[in-house]
Image (cartoon, rainbow, N blue to C red):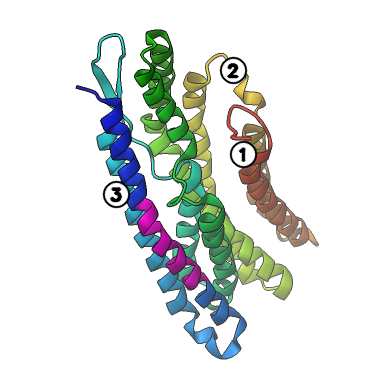
Amino acid sequence: MFSPDVTALALESAKGTLASLGMYLDVLILLACAAVLVALVVPTLRSRLRPMLAALLGTLLLGEAALIWFHVRLWQLCQLADPTTGLVTGGFAVPIWVESEKLYIWALIVTALALGVKRHGTELRPMLAVGAIGLAAGAVLLGRPFMEPLPDFFAQYNAFLSAWRSGDINMAYSAFRGAEASRLYYYNAWYMWVHPPLLFFSYGAFVVSFAATVLMVARRRSSFEQTAYRWARLGYLPLTLGMVVGMPWAIIAWAGDAWWWSGKVNMSIMMWVLYTAYLHSRLYLRRRGMWKVVAALAILSFVALVLTYITTYIVPGAHSVA
């Protein structure tokens, strides 16, 4: 039998455990970021950069393990029950890369790529390490996935529990319908287990491509341009596939809303168009001065990627938390 009071107490206990672990994980991650930064700025310690990145990756993986445990607990605890019948309709399979965990998973991917990149690894690794530090510190200080996990999810689910406890059957049923729609069309939708990871992997590949482009402009070496192209090409396919997969999801989840006017959606399309233009511009790379156009498109594409991420938080729309 579904009990909102028992569920609420169990959730608070799980959140408390995650927060207790998070106090240590936050410190470990920030210390690892500081160690990577020291290895970057102290020339005599530059040879220690790779071990420091490995330490950062290890702490991020520890944090990811804690988040996975927490999501398993959510699956076990967060059930929906129809207030008119008392029957449980299902639980929440909340993906591990939504809301406050977006920046964290991106940091994890970029750190892994910084550690594992081989071609021009010595030159690329310092720039990628800067990106890894920024993303990891931002994930801990801004995203706060351990201390303030999944704020939108808990706002809705706690509202459902409160409505159930109120004794008002109409209010409880309305909250149930809203939570059930989120469960079916968002948290438990297979799109959410495919669409975001494809995009975040592509974002990681584009970070490597951007770093190689900057080195190409700074050092005027064609081998850096080739590396930038290969990583952009690697990221382009999952980006395209992720956007294609997201379209039927948007049609179903946001039926009746003009989601195609969302700032995030339009910025994503602009980013895709720019990366398409960049990849196609290489057909004319041997023309005089064309490398400057290719470099400009590569940099502009990455700027569009960053703006696409930021748009989620500053531009209102169906695909936004602004």
Side of 182 where 211 appears, left or right: right
Q: Main secondary structure of the magenta part?
A: helix
Crowding near the residue tagged with mark 3, few <14, some 14–19, many ≥20 C-alpha atoms within 10 Å: some
Asked if the magenta segment contains residue 85, the reply would be no
Q: Amino acid at mark 3?
A: Trp
Nearest to the observer: residue 303 or residue 149: 149
Decide: is 6 above or below 101: above
Tell which circle, 1 or 3, labels the residue nearer the N-terminal end.
Answer: 3
Numbered circles on residues, count: 3
Residue 36 locus on image (x, y percent) = 52, 75
Secondary structure type for disc 3? helix
Q: Are marks 1 and 2 in contact (CB under 8 Å)?
A: no
Side of 118 where 11 appears, left or right: left
Q: Which mark is residue 257?
A: 2
Nearest to the observer: residue 210 or residue 169: 169
Q: Residue furthest right?
A: 289
Quarter of the image where the C terminus is located: top right
Residue drawn where x is 46% and y is 76% of the image: 52
Q: Residue furthest left?
A: 1
Q: Which mark is residue 312?
A: 1
Q: Amino acid at mark 1?
A: Thr
Range shown magenta: 18-33
Q: Which mark is residue 17?
A: none
Circle 3 is placed at which residue position? Answer: 69
